Image (tube, helix red, strand yellow):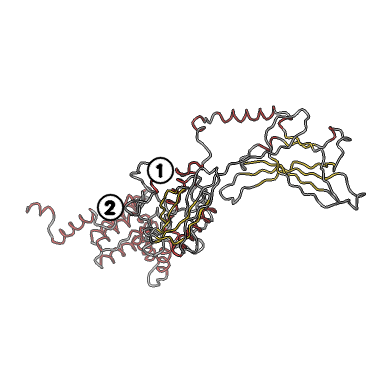
Amino acid sequence: MGGSCSASSLSTGTQAFAALCMVGNTCFFSSEPTQIYRFLRTRNLIAPIFLHRTLTYMSHRNSRTNIKRKTFKVDDMLSKVEKMKGEQESHSLSAHLQLTFTGFFHKNDKPSQNSENEQNSVTLEVLLVKVCHKKRKDVSCPIRQVPTGKKQVPLNPDLSQIKPGNFPSLAVSSNEFEPSNSHMVKSYSLLFRVTRPGRRDFNGLINVSWSDEPSFCSGVGRLMNEIHWMLTLFFLCLHQFLYNNNTRQQTEARDDLHCPWCTLNCRKLYSLLKHLKLCHSRFIFNYVYHPKGARIDVSINECYDGSYAGNPQDIHRQPGFAFSRNGPVKRTPITHILVCRPKRTKASMSEFLESEDGEVEQQRTYSSGHNRLYFHSDTCLPLRPQEMEVDSEDEKDPEWLREKTITQIEEFSDVNEGEKEVMKLWNLHVMKHGFIADNQMNHACMLFVENYGQKIIKKNLCRNFMLHLVSMHDFNLISIMSIDKAVARLREMQQKLEKGESTSPMDEESSEEQSGTTNGYSENNMRERSSEMDSISGVTKQSKKQKL
């Protein structure tokens, strides 16, 4: 598989040379990266991720300049539009493209058999072809054909017998050559279609380039064909693959600066090397000077980090829907903060030369961080981007679980309706706040009275609630003092309702702030514990102070 370097002879007009290494499918160790980059090329043509002309080393591909932005003013837009409209109205007939057809001349060596039925004119159709700029989604430049009119042109006329004013003419308005917002026209051309009825059609396609030319005194438009000679520079490209410091691929020469994988025209050797180094990091590129140009040695990058660096949501999606774009969706926000960016160095070919010590230069990433996918702890499903802002771990009572709890309580047959209503409210209350320990029950009872006391009074469930508190005391979950406080607070709310005062339940957040944290000891619990211990021991706080 080895080969020698070959270079073809170049013309004398050659100004510069470049080298590029071609990748072939016959090279066994480079087939996988080559196929990957070819796939990426096809995908970037359909849906490009970025524009190459926006890169710093590809600035020569950007034909637009930002000089007019400095002097641009929004207030001047109206005056410019009014000025353009005034100029259009002041334009005379000279602003139109007027075409005058003297005749259609066609020499036929063979005499026609149906000469008596032949017509002495042909139908000429003129179309204005607009070649528009290619948009992002377009594969090729869109072409629009605007019909301007049809005329009957005499066939092989005798110009000496026809007066100059009797020639058919056609005028194309200058408004057809104005750019529109939807289609930015790149070039214009005229398309002529000649048809002779009753015989074989003469389909002649004539492309004429139109430009602003001074009008002639005769008033007859002239069709001018301009031939532009362009100097093409040829570049010698030497393609050589290295594997274990040995040539394993036949060297080829190219005469352009196109990337062999992306087919991107870089136009400059430095831009080509920069593109290869940054966009095709699966290979290592070393620049070597050549007397007739340059040479780039390509080898496999053994230290390439091929780990997945894309959106982690795409890995767990269904096949066929990972990279589909059916509409706007919320994506995982990824923000990279560059603390220190190195100073941009001047463009130099020395950065592509092979290092003397032989060590491979590894580009350090400017941004570092993790790109992980999180899962729900209860369902083990991936956490979607729209669920990032809401912590699902705090939602202990989803809607389906509340409905299931209420349905199960309704199925009880050994309790009355009042007890069912109290148990519904209590179970939903405990499930929402996550009360799981015995020392949280005192705080749970007081919070339950604050939130649902008004509802208990309106439904006449005070006795059922007292029986529920007594049942909890029998299981040593709450103290007698907690029962007294809860009942006292319930009676206070009942008296306010009888007087007509509003006793709206407190907000959950404010009640939690006043009562302390939900899952820990609060100050009220500590005081209740201390007073309870004092009452059990039979010694009051006043007697303790006297003893001290």
Q: Which quarter of the picture shows residue 301?
A: bottom left
Q: Which quarter of the picture shows residue 183?
A: top right
Q: Give whichever of 273, 16 is nearer the camera.
A: 16
Gap in Å between the C-alphas at discs 1 and 2?
Answer: 70 Å
| Residue found at the far bottom of this picture | 414
* Residue at the image point whose x is 47% and y is 50% from the top: 19
Which three-letter amino acid code belongs to the residue tagged 2?
Ser
Residue 136 lies, with reference to residue 173, above or below; the image says: below
Number of residues whose C-alpha sits closer than 10 Å to that of mark 1, classed few (under 14), some (14–19) or many (20 or more):
few
Q: Which quarter of the picture shows residue 521?
A: bottom left
User: What residue sits right under mark 1 in the picture?
Assistant: 348
Q: Are marks 1 and 2 in contact (CB under 8 Å)?
A: no
User: What residue sits right under mark 2 in the picture?
Assistant: 515
Label 2 SS: helix
* Residue at the image point whose x is 56% and y is 48% from the top: 136
Image position of 29 (left or right of 186): left
Q: Position of residue 106 (x, y in %)?
A: 82, 45
Q: Which circle's residue, 1 or 2, is located before the other in the chain?
A: 1
| Residue found at the far left of this picture | 547
Which three-letter amino acid code belongs to the residue tagged 1?
Ser
Number of residues whose C-alpha sits closer than 10 Å to that of mark 2, classed few (under 14), some (14–19) or many (20 or more):
some
Tag of residue 132: none
Q: Give whichever of 95, 514 is nearer the camera.
A: 95
Q: Number of marks in the image?
A: 2
Label 1 SS: loop
Q: Position of residue 181 (x, y in %)?
A: 61, 40
Image position of 316 (left or right of 130): left
Q: Position of residue 537 (x, y in %)?
A: 13, 61
Q: Position of residue 315 (x, y in %)?
A: 44, 61
Q: Nearer the viewer, mark 1 or mark 2?
A: 1
Q: Give whichever of 116, 370 is nearer the camera.
A: 116
